[in-house]
Amino acid sequence: MLWLSELLMKHHELNSFEELKEKLTEEVKQGEMFFRMDVRPPFQDTPENWEDILEAIFTSAGSIG
């Protein structure tokens, strides 16, 4: 189970929502099957629909990888 808060804590180098999206794609391609969004990403560029975007990335990257 991949928790968003754990992903953010493990990767302090992330500076933007765009970088978070890339890292999430990498995690899914490494075999993560479940994803929980337990915190809001703390980046200035985080859009209002961030949950929908991250869910779509998780779902689509999982079907590719």
Image: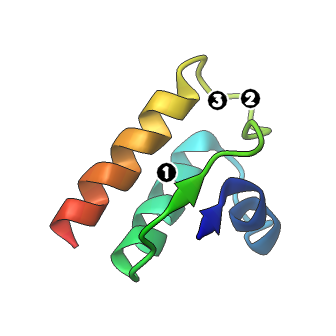
Residue 58 falls left or right of residue 2: left
Circles 1 and 3 in contact, beta carbons < 8 Å? no
> What's the distance in space between the residues labelled 1 and 3, CA to CA?
10 Å
Please state the horizontal and vertical placement of residue 64, each as a whole percent of the image. Answer: 17, 65
- Pointer 2 or 1: first along the chain: 1
* Render colour scheme: rainbow
- Dot label at residue 44: 2
> What's the distance in space between the residues labelled 2 and 1, CA to CA?
14 Å
Tag 1 secondary structure: helix
- Pointer 1 or 3: first along the chain: 1
Residue drawn at x 31%, y 51% is 59
Residue drawn at x 76%, y 66% is 6
Q: Which residue is mark 1?
A: 21
The kind of residue tagged 2 is Gln
Q: Which residue is mark 3?
A: 46
Q: Quadrant of residue 11?
A: bottom right
The kind of residue tagged 3 is Thr
Q: Residues within 10 Å of mark 1 (few under 14, many from 20)?
A: some
Residue 30 falls left or right of residue 19: left
